[in-house]
Image (tube, rainbow, N blue to C red):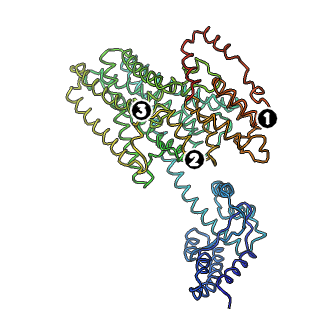
Amino acid sequence: MTSPSQRIDAMLTEMEEKRIQFAPLESIMISNRVKNLTKQAVRPQRSNPVDSQVVHVKEEKKRRNKRRDSLKGAGSAEEQRAILESIDKPVIKVVGLGYATKEHCKEVSEQYLIVVRNSGGDVETDVRKWVQTSFPTEHMTPSETENITHILVFIAIQIRVLMKMSRIGVAVKMGLTLCLGYVDILTDFLVAKSYYDAGRFDTAYATGGFAVMAIVLQGVLTFFQKNFKERFWRMSTSLLGLGPLMEGASVWMGKEDTDSLLTPSVMYAVMKAIEISVESIPESIIQVVGLLKAKSTSDIQTIQIVGVISSIVSGAFIMMDGNFEFVLSRYLDSPGNPYWGWINKQGAWKKQRQRFGMFLFNTFYFLQFVFSMSLFTLSFSSNTPLILLLSTEFAVICLYMLSKKELFGWATTHHPSPLINWIFPIIPWLLEYMLVCAVPVTVAFVPMELGPEVFSGIVAWRLITNSGIIYVALGELENHYLTPTSIMMGYTVSSALALLGLFMFFRNVDENFDVNLFWRPKGGVQHMRERWEDAEIWVKTCKTKDEEHWSHVAAVNPTYLPFDKVTPWICTELVEKYADKNANVERPHWFNDEGGSKFIKRIIELYDWREKDKDEVNEALAKLFGGDALLEYGWHAMDHDEINDQLSEWGWWWWEGEQKHLNESE
């Protein structure tokens, strides 16, 4: 009589003889029943159940194959689902006795998903063709081939259903966003016409002018195309106001635009940001000022009220949807970053309540900003005081960031030009400041942007100043159709609704997210150091911590990089792993890309202004790539003293302080 261990060895031998050679996925998956037999083999006192299990496994295998073969005549998804549900624990047996790797699993999965996504409708035929080309069916029995094919077809059908539902949801959200945007622009032109017909030419020209400016800027944005034909076509359609529609359609269809320097999703997001900052915000203030100048309700037309409402609702919804979509995409790319994890993932209903809370807060926060700024403008009978007020606030923010030595976070990372180093941080921060004042953009609270304390400080300060401006400016409306009492009542109700939206948003934040991150002070330097020192990998696409370090070094501005960590990483860790003496060690693709030229050029950019570590890094690169690599790539292309003399002639006296900061050791 054979022992349980001998019977199990015989079963495994039989499985090995009938194995499926699955080359791309070198893994082994054994059924749960065989695992149970293995566990029982170490306990001889339970030998009788094993005898029955061995017989049952063989009988069950025949029964499953028979049921799966019946799927050949099943056409609809319901019929296939009913048949598969009758099979107890279907098992895919892939025996290769190799080493499974995540890269192989990912490659096969991506190929399968591409086939399912690009299927023309006959999913079963497309999946069968893919199995024939991707699986070594010559080493598989017909029954095994059919079993795997049926299961993959069933999974593909379910994926297609989910993809269709997802595409419908994206289409609805994108369609609503586009509809609100076009309604806003259309009402702006109608409002401009109504003011023109009423003889109020200044308001009419201002209203129409900002609408035209938004369309022109969207057209200029499409200039960044690679060929003239595409550039001319995109600019022509954008100047007709069809730019957002075309880019939105490209995003929905998943088109990879190779003729543009910007992807369709980025182009679409930038166009909507232009629409809010250039069109919605100034248009709303201009139109509310026009309404407040009216002496009676008879001077107000319905289209003028509709124009204000459409601008506010459109801006609030676009920013809400943009916040969620952008943060979700960043979270999927970098799930380890705690600042991208606030979207609720515990249920669809909670997520929708969170979205509605943000939309409610955005709407009435935007309304308060527009109304208070309109009253401020009306009180002084000029736009100049309003411009001075907002400019002063922005100057204070820049000085605060300068005191933290993070003003140049947006600056170029090549040989720094003083003019560029001032322009680059001011332009994006000005846009972020404008949006946070009117319709908060949550990306601004990330440490390497404006930062949590600046973001929350702007929101709180704006709520306080809105209340103060409205209270002080009430006297200007005593002779108008709006009374101070009605204004205060309306402002109180809007404040309550804004706070209600804020409560709904934070009440439904993901349970694993620390809400204190929205206002806890943390700069980009500190945040970057935490990312570098954390043992876990934050970026999903990176396989090793070294690759993640390189992703930071390659993309992050040197203002934020912890050079006391970067320098030892290059000069010690990388040298020990990949120096020329370790010729047999395979270098990763990120390190050896284009023969290491990308790595060398980037290190030169970072250390060209750091005299303290320059020689040490030069020696490390020579060990890594052989010879004096820095001289080969033009490290000493321009003498350091020469650059300082040139900067002094230009009068950039402040550059010495910034240069000193870049050369300081952390």
Residue 121: name its quadrant.
Answer: bottom right
Q: Report the amino acid beneath label 1.
A: Gly
Mark before the other along the chain sequence, 3 or 2: 3
Q: Which amino acid does label 3 sit on?
A: Phe
- From this view, report whether residue 605 is shown above or below residue 386: below
Q: How far apart are marks 3 and 2 (CA)?
A: 27 Å
Residue drawn where x is 63% and y is 34% of the image: 567
Q: Name the residue under label 2.
A: 537
Q: Which of marks 3 and 1 is in front?
A: 1
Instruction: Name the residue tied to disc 3.
Output: 455
Q: Where is residue 305 in the image (x, y as percent from the top left)?
A: 34, 31
Of mark 3 and mark 1, the one earlier in the sequence is: 3
Q: Residue 202 sits in which quadrant?
A: top left
Q: Say if residue 174 shows up in the picture.
A: no
Q: Is mark 1 on a helix, strand or loop?
A: loop
Where's residue 615, x and y in %?
69, 27
Query: What quarter of the picture does the N terminus occupy?
Result: bottom right
Query: Could you give the CA–CA distance between mark 1 and mark 2, rounded to whole angstroms?
Result: 30 Å
Residue 441 or 35: which is nearer the viewer?
35
Q: Is mark 2 on a helix, strand or loop?
A: loop
Q: For the residue marked with disc 2, what is the amino acid?
A: Ile
Structural crowding at the residue carrying mark 3, measured as other residues with C-alpha within 10 Å and reported as few (<14), some (14–19) or many (≥20)? many
Q: Quadrant of residue 604?
A: top right
Element type where label 3 sits in the image: helix
Query: Which of the numbered marks, if any, corresponds to residue 626?
Result: 1
